[in-house]
Image: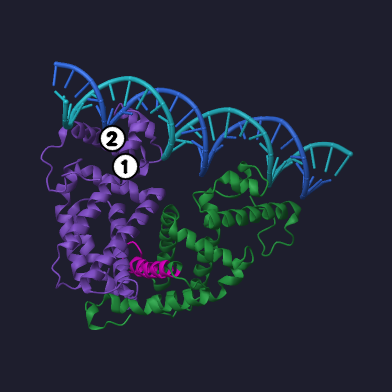
Chain colours: A green, B purple, C cyan, D blue
Amino acid sequence: METAETAEAAPRPGLRERKKRRTRDALLRAALELFTTQGYERTTVDEIAEAVDVSQRTFFRHFAGKEDAAFALQDMVEAHFVTALRGRPAGEAPLEALRRAVLEGWDTISDAVGAVVPVELYLRMFRVIESTPVLLAAHLGRSARTEEQIARLLAAREGLDVDTDPRPRLAVAVFGAVMRVTGRLWSTGEDLGLEEMRALTAAHLDQVGPALAGNWRADTRP
Amino acid sequence: METAETAEAAPRPGLRERKKRRTRDALLRAALELFTTQGYERTTVDEIAEAVDVSQRTFFRHFAGKEDAAFALQDMVEAHFVTALRGRPAGEAPLEALRRAVLEGWDTISDAVGAVVPVELYLRMFRVIESTPVLLAAHLGRSARTEEQIARLLAAREGLDVDTDPRPRLAVAVFGAVMRVTGRLWSTGEDLGLEEMRALTAAHLDQVGPALAGNWRADTRP
DNA sequence: AGGTTAATGACAGCGACTGACAGTTGACAA
DNA sequence: TTGTCAACTGTCAGTCGCTGTCATTAACCT
């Protein structure tokens, strides 16, 4: 299955692979451009393929489906976050590690995403995902899988068993819920931008405590 | 758009409507039966229609899609819960109202569901939803919409504005997250049954506090 | 240079879903 | 009762996402 390639940093991708990646990137760019301009559902796979002058069949050789293209960037971002989480010191409390991993992630996403497509396209695509029901559902489904992964990660970190102790899954679920509320609000508002996202994230995480308290009317400060 | 039907309890459905509901119920029963026995994806719409001896086109006149049939019961249950929530006294704290509404809901679901199909079918279908990726995603998407609705309901109850105060959405999101963890665990375990679900729900709600605390290792009691 | 292998194009087919048209059958009034 | 209207349905054709198959092209390797 593997020759002598298990080392790090491939020495040279080779012409064939370079070509392959080039058409993949072209397909991705065309797809996102079409999705963000005329909408996800109003864009057919044939259109995307035609925009790159490639057969429809080729599109499906690079992406599992239309949906896969829509989430290509989002997947990068989530993987980026999980990596950041793994890098947190073991002594940190679980929720603290989660919080720092996200905030730290927002600062370095531009580089990861920008290497493939203009960052602005990611921001626009995020809006499309949040505003297209079927994409939002798919997004939540993917998030659920990521959360399960993170729950196991945290449990292992703390030496707990996810199958008998509900706390890891609960904590991650709550954290994910807050992130989703944040992302939704961010995509709805006018002022996009990663800085605003960072600030919104921190603000919402700070509001979880008050939100879970019973006396909302006591303090009427948003 | 409406004649003189705004009153409550239709005096008589009329033969035509009775017939219509009969074929709808038959389609729903056939669909759920097929979904739970051979799986959602391995069941075609033609199969469902054929099982009721009806054209495929007719299926789509009763259900927006295959997915719609799969969630017919789940929609009833969610609506049931929202109704229960509306019935909670205004003086109750938001989270307390949510908690009591769910627990109260689990006690009366059998009647609501049982009027259409055997309750056991609902339990089996729930498992199918949780174990079929595309259905799970759709379920989460629907839940998101329900949560938005509930957030507005709670905000109105407490005299807050959902657009400026993040606490209602946060509280509902956290609550929904806990419910999802509960449902997932319930559908994975062996002992189905509404009583177990009730107990699991209460147990998980009680564990949110400990899960959000930083010191998981302090207490190693699941 | 010649054989191997991976990427692609072209074609056929399945399943979910929609629009259009026609036939049947309850509902309701003359 | 009868005739008209509207609702429910069946049939047919077509779109779109997606998959399997096979031949062709071009990069890779010896």
In this picture, is B190 found above or below A162? above
- Which secondary structure type mostly characterizes the magenta part of the structure? helix
Residue B10: x, y in percent? 13, 42
Q: Which residue is most to the left?
A: B11
Q: Are marks 1 and 2 in contact (CB under 8 Å)?
A: yes
Magenta range is A161-186
Alpha carbons under labels 1 and 2: distance apart: 8 Å
Q: Residue B186 versus residue B68: which sits nearer the camera?
A: B68
**Residue where numbered disc 2 is placed:** B27
Q: Give the tally of numbered discs.
A: 2
Q: Residue A86 versus residue A61: which sits nearer the camera?
A: A61
Classify mark 1: helix, strand or loop.
helix
Mark positioned earlier in the residue sequence (1 or 2): 2
Q: Residues within 10 Å of mark 2 (few under 14, many from 20)?
A: many
Whether residue A164 appears in this view of the structure is no
Residue type at tag 2? Leu
Whether residue A122 appears in this view of the structure is yes
Question: For the residues tagged 1 and 2, is the chain the same?
Answer: yes
Residue drawn at 22 percent across, 45 percent down: B2
Dot label at residue B69: 1
Residue drawn at 63 percent across, 63 percent down: A116
In this picture, is D27 found above or below B66? below
Dot label at residue A38: none
Residue B169: x, y in percent? 32, 69
Q: Quadrant of residue A34?
A: bottom right
Residue drawn at 23 percent across, 61 percent down: B200
Q: Chain of mark 2?
A: B
Residue type at tag 1? Ala
Q: Chain of mark 1?
A: B
Q: In the shown orientation, is residue B7 left or right of residue A132?
A: left
Q: Residues within 10 Å of mark 1 (few under 14, many from 20)?
A: many
